[in-house]
Image: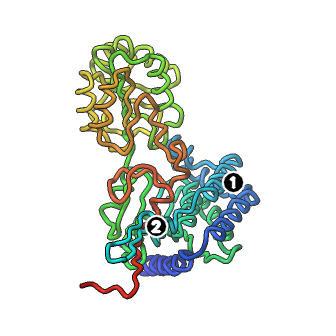
């Protein structure tokens, strides 16, 4: 059960965020960009303090026995703080979506009807051991004219506080309300429940983290939620595909950054060509320290594989572990993905354009990649700029969530004494 002080403090924090959002919404691009410039400058000036705060989190995380993948997401050094500052600069350089004219029509009676893009309002961001999200989400919301209330994981509490200090300082430097970016000080799970039930002040909740967190937010929220569900990403190697391309795509998808949501988690190989494709790929992955968990047909070709358990298909490992299954052609791959995929990213490596067309059409996912790594499902890589995450739900957004996803629409009617007959 939540305590009265927890509920009161979160309610008051969200109310202050609502007031800040009203002040922020009409401010022009120049003021918002000036704040972003001050935030990135403060991050660079105060990088050593951020790294010191992160060291406290890292020490506590190691004592808890947190996985290597999570430790990697948690870790901040001078280079990563610089990367965070650079991401703020990137947001500053993006076009401001607020005020964009989306459509315009003049009705036969002379009434002018316009649809323009406006800030969403107040965003509640719930996330785990990713301190970079503290700044990157704040920067995106600022540019979109939104206030943000952050609730980070307990593992990163000191890092998040240090980073948010620079965000709030940058806002204050240019006369914007500091409460446009706030951090919930409570790290227990009940604080999440209270936050996502603030229907009077919060317009959208965005959970970003493990499956348990996403489910908790979805089940307890009373405000709209955009789900950033787990990334059970597949790559299907079609019969006759280019082996060199297949090796490169699988290695990149699995090994470049195993602990991220667009990393490859399951490899599907056409049974008719598995003897050519699977052994050389497995050799490369095993040599790189990747654990392979295969079905019976896969293990017949690569005996070094561990036997896959039923739960390995559909698992998000976020580590150097890959499930492998030999399937009966494209139909088998499509059936497997339909059963086990999470709607995040699915890839096919093929020379057959008809197979590629079927894959594009029949796979239900936020992103489908043909002859490309799953790792490209990223706002920056797709030319969309920085992102607040990758949404796997259908409403109100799907795929990389950039600035546009943090806005909504307003209809504007301009008349000259018009009345409805």
Occupied quadrant, residue 334: top left
For numbered disc 1, what is the local secondary structure? Answer: helix
> Is 67 positioned to the left or the right of 193 in the image?
right
> Is 192 positioned to the left or the right of 65 in the image?
left
Q: Is residue 93 depicted above or below 344 in this figure?
A: below
Q: Residues within 10 Å of mark 2 (few under 14, many from 20)?
A: many
In the drawing, what numbered circle is on residue 117? 2
Q: Is residue 56 visible?
A: no
Name the quarter where the N terminus is drawn.
bottom left
Residue drawn at x 49%, y 69% is 186
**Camera-side residue of 193 and 329:** 329
> Is 120 positioned to the left or the right of 74 in the image?
left
Sequence-earlier tag: 2 or 1: 1
Name the quarter where the C terminus is drawn.
bottom left
Occupied quadrant, residue 364: top left
Give the percent coordinates (x, y) of residue 69.
51, 41
Q: Residues within 10 Å of mark 1 (few under 14, many from 20)?
A: many
Q: Which residue is mark 1?
A: 51
Give the percent coordinates (x, y) of residue 401.
46, 54
Give the percent coordinates (x, y) of residue 68.
53, 40
């Amino acid at each position: 059960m939540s305590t009265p002080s927890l509920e009161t403090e979160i309610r008051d924090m969200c109310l202050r965020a609502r007031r800040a959002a009203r002040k922020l919404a009409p401010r022009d691009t120049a003021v918002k960009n000036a704040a972003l410039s001050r935030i990135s400058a403060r991050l660079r000036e105060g990088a050593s303090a951020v790294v010191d705060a992160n060291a406290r989190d890292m020490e506590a995380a190691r004592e808890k026995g947190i996985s290597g993948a999570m430790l990697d997401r948690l870790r901040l050094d001078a280079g990563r703080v610089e990367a965070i500052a650079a991401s703020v600069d990137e947001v500053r350089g993006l076009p401001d979506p607020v005020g964009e004219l989306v459509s315009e029509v003049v009705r036969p009676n002379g009434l002018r009807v316009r649809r323009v893009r406006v800030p969403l309002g107040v965003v509640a961001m719930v996330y785990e051991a990713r301190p970079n999200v503290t700044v990157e989400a704040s920067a995106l919301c600022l540019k979109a004219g939104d206030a943000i209330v952050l609730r980070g994981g307990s593992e990163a509490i000191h890092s998040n506080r240090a980073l948010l200090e620079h965000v709030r300082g940058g806002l204050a430097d240019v006369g914007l309300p500091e409460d446009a970016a706030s951090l919930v000080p409570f790290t227990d799970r009940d604080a999440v429940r209270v936050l996502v039930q603030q229907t009077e002040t919060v317009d959208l909740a965005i959970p970003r983290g493990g499956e348990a967190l996403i489910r908790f937010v979805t089940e307890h929220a009373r405000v709209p939620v955009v789900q950033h569900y787990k990334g059970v990403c597949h790559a299907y190697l079609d019969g006759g595909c280019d082996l060199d391309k297949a090796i490169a795509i699988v290695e990149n998808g699995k090994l470049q950054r195993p602990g991220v949501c667009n990393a490859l988690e399951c490899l599907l190989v056409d049974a008719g060509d598995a003897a050519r494709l699977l052994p050389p790929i497995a050799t490369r992955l095993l040599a790189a320290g990747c654990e392979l968990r295969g079905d019976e047909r896969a293990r017949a070709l690569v005996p070094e594989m561990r036997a896959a358990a039923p739960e390995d298909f559909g698992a998000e490992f976020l580590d150097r572990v890959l499930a492998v299954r030999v399937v009966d052609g494209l139909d088998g791959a499509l059936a497997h993905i339909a059963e086990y995929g999470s709607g995040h990213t699915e890839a096919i490596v093929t020379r057959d354009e008809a197979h590629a067309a079927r894959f594009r059409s029949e796979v239900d996912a936020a992103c489908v990649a043909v002859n490309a790594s799953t790792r490209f499902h990223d706002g920056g890589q797709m030319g969309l700029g920085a992102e607040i995450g990758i949404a796997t739900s259908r409403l109100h957004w799907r795929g990389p969530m950039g600035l546009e996803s943090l806005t909504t629409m307003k209809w504007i009617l301009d008349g000259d004494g018009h009345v409805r007959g």
